[in-house]
Image (tube, rainbow, N blue to C red):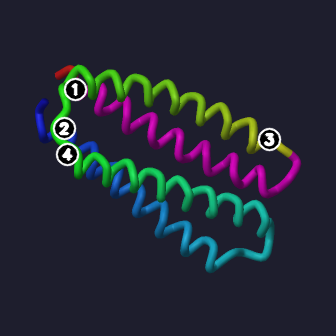
């Protein structure tokens, strides 16, 4: 396994996790008066995703090296899951309840970013 690609992937994931957590804290603290329930759902869900992404990134840092074929398989599976997250986000964003709409927009944003990240590193792993 080439250490740089997994390290760069992990750094990108942890940076995204920290940004998700930071914006979630700020967003929950400085909530606008208009559509407050939708925004609360959006920021809360982003915070949850930030925690999960951070845990995955941390696990990558403390585990040993992996084979390139295994990493490619994980990235391919994750890309498929990202598409499911995007579809779920769209479904939730079209619900009537503002809290579910906020959850949906957050899941959509997270899924889109993770799809780009996973596909970019999957492409780089074949270079």
Q: Are marks 2 and 4 in contact (CB under 8 Å)?
A: yes
Residue drawn 43% across the image and 51% down it = 53
Of callouts 1 and 2, the N-terminal one? 2
Of callouts 3 and 1, the N-terminal one? 3
Q: Is residue 104 magenta?
A: yes
Q: Which numbered mark, 4 or 1, is in the foreground of this view?
A: 4
The residue to which callout 3 is attached is: 94
The residue to which callout 4 is attached is: 7
- Distance from label 2 to label 4 (Cα)? 5 Å
The residue to which callout 2 is attached is: 5
- Distance from label 1 to label 2 (Cα)? 7 Å
Q: Which numbered mark, 3 or 1, is in the foreground of this view?
A: 1
Q: Are marks 4 and 3 in contact (CB under 8 Å)?
A: no
The dominant secondary structure in magenta is helix
The disc at residue 125 is 1
Q: Are marks 1 and 2 in contact (CB under 8 Å)?
A: yes
Of callouts 4 and 1, the N-terminal one? 4
């Amino acid at each position: 396994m080439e250490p740089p690609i997994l390290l760069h992937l992990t750094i990108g994931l942890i940076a995204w996790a920290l940004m998700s957590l930071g914006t979630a804290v700020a967003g929950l603290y400085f909530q606008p008066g208009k559509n407050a329930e939708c925004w609360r759902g959006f920021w809360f869900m982003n915070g949850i995703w930030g925690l999960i992404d951070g845990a995955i990134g941390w696990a990558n840092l403390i585990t040993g090296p992996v084979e390139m074929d295994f990493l490619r398989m994980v990235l391919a599976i994750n890309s498929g899951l990202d598409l499911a997250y995007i579809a779920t986000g769209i479904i939730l964003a079209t619900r009537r309840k503002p809290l579910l709409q906020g959850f949906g927009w957050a899941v959509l944003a997270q899924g889109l970013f993770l799809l780009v990240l996973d596909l970019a590193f999957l492409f780089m792993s074949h270079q």
